Amino acid sequence: MAKPEKEPETELGKRLKLLRKKSVYGDQKSFGAALGFSQAALSNYENGLREPTAAALAAYSRVTGVSLDWLLTGMGNTLYGGDIEVADTSLAHVRKVIYNVAFSVAGKDLRRVKPKPFAEEFLGLFDYLMTLDERDEKSAEKVIDFGAERLTRASDQGEL
């Protein structure tokens, strides 16, 4: 049986824990692996027992797409803030987050795939989707399915 998680002792710890809980990873072990450090280190950062290094904070920013300003101060723009509307977020920021997520997933979870070409291809799919007049769920599924087939073929041929 897993131990219940401690409540963070610092404001920074609260923000770090919030990022993990809002991420696709959820648990400390998976999120720590995506960030490039251990579950124990992540737990120490979240609980305020240790201050994250500059490199650790940069990893949080890279993987989640949030600004270092928000991480350090709790102020500024972040996609995870309850008071931030999607309209307040620039397309450039959304593209950066998509690129960083694709790069991170390719680097950590996909075998035989180079992260940079994968992220660029993935971002190209997003850009194409944004040009469509109809951006409904079926259109998105078609673009994603087509992109997945292209990425699979490119990976099988060693192009990614």
Image (cartoon, rainbow, N blue to C red):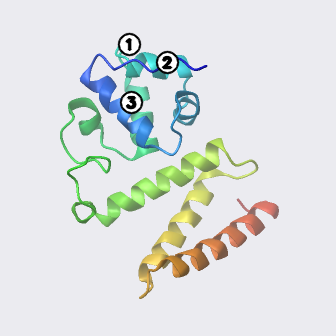
Vertical relation: 119 (above or below) 143:
above
Camera-near label (3 vs 1) is: 3
Quick one: label 3, few (<14), some, or many (20+) residues within 10 Å? Answer: many
Image quarter hosting the N terminus: top right
143 with respect to 96 (left or right): right
The residue at the far top in this view is: 49
Judge by depth and name the residue closer to the eye, 10 or 103. Answer: 10
Q: Answer with the quarter of the image where residue 9 lies.
A: top left
Residue denoted by label 3: 17
Quick one: label 1, few (<14), some, or many (20+) residues within 10 Å? Answer: few
Vertical relation: 20 (above or below) 53:
below
Give the number of the disc on residue 50.
1
Q: Amino acid at mark 1?
A: Arg
Please say if the residues under marks 2 and 1 sit with CB atoms less than 8 Å apart.
yes
Q: Amino acid at mark 2?
A: Ala
Q: Amino acid at mark 3?
A: Lys
Looking at marks 3 and 1 on the same chain, the residue that comes earlier in the sequence is marked by: 3
Camera-near label (3 vs 2) is: 3
Name which residue lies at 25% across and 38% down.
70
Looking at marks 3 and 2 on the same chain, the residue that comes earlier in the sequence is marked by: 3
Judge by depth and name the residue closer to the eye, 38 or 95. Answer: 38
How far is disc 2 from disc 1 in space, using C-alphas? 8 Å
Please say if the residues under marks 3 and 2 sit with CB atoms less than 8 Å apart.
no
Estimate the x, y position of residue 79 in percent, counting from the top left. 31, 51
Quick one: label 2, few (<14), some, or many (20+) residues within 10 Å? Answer: some
Residue denoted by label 2: 41
Name which residue lies at 40% across and 34% down.
58
How far is disc 3 from disc 2 in space, using C-alphas? 12 Å
Estimate the x, y position of residue 8 in percent, counting from the top left. 33, 20
